Amino acid sequence: MSVMTVVLFVAGLGLLVLGADLLVKGASRLAAALGISPLVIGLTVVAYGTSAPEMAVSVKSAFLGQADLALGNVVGSNIFNVLFILGASALISPLVVSAQIVRLDVPIMIALSVATWALCLDGGIGRLDGALLFGGAIAYTVFQIVQSRRESAAIQAEFAAEYEPREKTSTAANLGWVAVGLALLVLGSRWLVDGAVAFAQALGVSELVIGLTIVAAGTSLPEVATSIMAALRGERDIAVGNVVGSNIFNILAVLGLTGLVAPQGLAAHSGLMAFDLPVMIAVAIACVPIFASGQVIARWEGALFLFYYVAYTAYVVMAAQHHDALPMYGLVMGAFVLPLTALTLAVVAWRAWRERRG
């Protein structure tokens, strides 16, 4: 693997993060100038902007016919968002989960995760599937805007503190930030995809593995920054809402648009269907008992999420290399760790149910 490959990948990643930041900066200020509330800006403009790297990379990969990289990026990002970002954020500060996220957004995330697996049963995501998902993205955005008017004053104040512009800038300057951000996203996606393909060839692993791990973690860096900074500032609703909203957006908008523009559709690898998509569904379902346990994500639950992200990544890497330790690793995880975790989550859910009834 050449030094140029590493430089290309890292430079592309840097451009994606910078481009997303400039896009969010310009678009959020334009929205504020139009009189749009900080809450709506946070739920729409910022949510779309922080997922812009996933969008850019997946669409670019789709155009180049690299379906494994495009699909792996979305699935891997959703797993990374919940297990790593929420885990790290909860370790910093126990996270508060709003009632709406528990009642509405998490069930939507679970339903969409299952729907993604179901849509791939015929071999992948075609243009009709893409159109269906992207239409859902538009409907979900409209719903979020309508729903935001019913939020409490405390929640609205929290979003205002985070997303209200600190300084006024001209419309021309804001448009310039948006244009530069988009340009950097396009260039960064090209470099990162080229670097990722070179990584896969040099390491002798599939593009799916690279998409599920390195690319997924890299394109999720804006969400990492947003959620961890929100946790540090005590804006704990934003940290959770950012992750759940991003996962919903990744499936509806990123996967939807990618399916629409892919010349031959997005073929789903058998390994993705058998393991990674079920993991994405399981991770989404695991949010239910964790989020419902007093509507607070405790530090030990954050540590549990982080442990499972490390365990998942280790399995993906060992499977790609056909490592001798893989059978024993799978046996230990399947026979002991996963059942113990399921039992723990069941007890947590039961206690939360008892407390609500009491």
Image: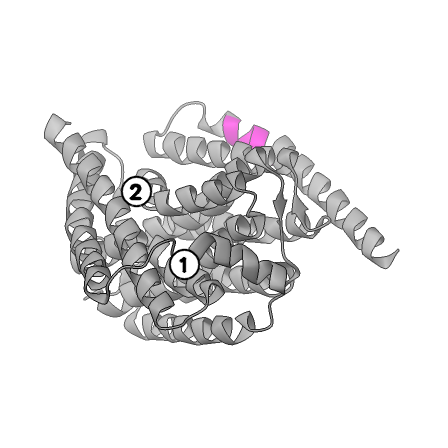
Q: Tell me the quadrant of the picture where the C terminus can be found.
A: bottom right
- Picture quarter containing residue 341? top right
Q: Earlier in the sequence, mark 2 or mark 1?
A: 1
Relative horizontal placement of residue 237, taking residue 293 as reference (left or right): left
Residue in front for this viewpoint, 336 or 155:
155
Q: Secondary structure at mark 2?
A: helix
* Residue 182 drawn at (x, y percent): 20, 57
User: With respect to residue 145, does 217 lie above or below?
Assistant: above
> How many numbered discs, if any?
2
The x and y percentages for residue 72 are 34, 49
Q: Is residue 2 visible?
A: no
Quarter of the image for residue 105 reads bottom right
Q: Position of residue 131 (x, y in %)?
A: 33, 74
Which circle, 2 or 1, is nearer the viewer?
A: 1
Q: Secondary structure at mark 1?
A: helix
> In the image shown, does 222 or 305 lie closer to the viewer?
222
What residue is shown with label 2? 215
Residue 63: x and y in percent read 17, 60
Circle number at residue 47: 1
Q: Is residue 203 visible?
A: yes
Q: Residue at x 32, y 59 (%)?
A: 168
Q: Amino acid at mark 1?
A: Ala
Q: Which residue sits at x=51%, y=27%?
A: 329
Placement of the N terminus among the 4 image quadrants: top left
Residue extent of the magenta highlight: 329-334
